[in-house]
Amino acid sequence: MKKLFLSAAIVLGGLTSFASTSPISNSIVKTVSIQDEYTEIKLEEVPSAVTDALKKAYPDAVLSKAYKNAASQYKLDVTVGDKVGSVYANADGTWVKK
């Protein structure tokens, strides 16, 4: 009789571990990329007003790449020390916040 109860307890205990469900976590990450349709241009094609504004605002900045969009706005990839970033400017050298 003891063996019957012990066997039943073991079987029922084993079934409860299979019946338990673990919480399912679905983490969906959405990445939205906004393309402003900038096309790469030569560094020599950047207007002097833009390069002068860059030298004035960031004297130690090194211009690595330049891009232009249809609205004559410029995206400038610059390096200042060990930091790399992008700044945006209009053709007249005024900064654009993006």
Image (spheres, rainbow, N blue to C red):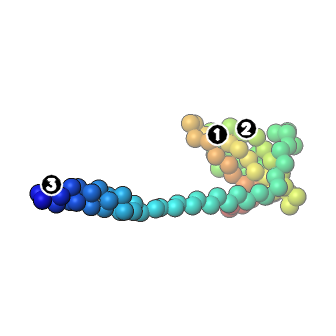
- Residue drawn at point x = 47 percent, y = 61 percent: 25
Which of pointers 2 and 3 indicates the residue nearer the eye? 3
The local crowd at label 1, few if under 14, some if 14 to 19, many if 20 or more residues have their Cα within 10 Å, is some
**Amino acid found under the numbered disc labelled 3:** Lys
Circles 1 and 2: CB atoms closer than 8 Å: yes
**Amino acid found under the numbered disc labelled 1:** Thr
The percent coordinates of residue 38 (x first, y second) are 82, 52
Quadrant in which residue 19 is drawn: bottom left
Quadrant in which residue 42 is drawn: top right
The percent coordinates of residue 97 (x first, y second) are 68, 62
- Residue drawn at point x = 75 percent, y = 51 percent: 75
- Residue drawn at point x = 70 percent, y = 57 percent: 33
In the picture of the structure, the residue carrying the numbered disc 1 is 79
- Mark closer to the chain start, 1 or 2: 2
The percent coordinates of residue 77 (x first, y second) are 71, 44
What is the spatial separation of the Cα atoms under label 1 and label 2, in whole angstroms?
7 Å
* Closer to us: 74 or 21: 21
Q: Is residue 26 above or below residue 40?
A: below
In the picture of the structure, the residue carrying the numbered disc 2 is 64
Number of labels in the image equals 3
* Closer to us: 80 or 65: 65
What is the spatial separation of the Cα atoms under label 2 and label 3, in whole angstroms?
81 Å
**83 relative position to 75: left or right:** left
In the picture of the structure, the residue carrying the numbered disc 3 is 3
- Mark closer to the chain start, 2 or 3: 3
The answer to whether residue 15 of the structure is visible from this angle is yes
Mark drawn on residue 1: none
**Amino acid found under the numbered disc labelled 2:** Ser
Which of pointers 3 and 1 indicates the residue nearer the eye? 3
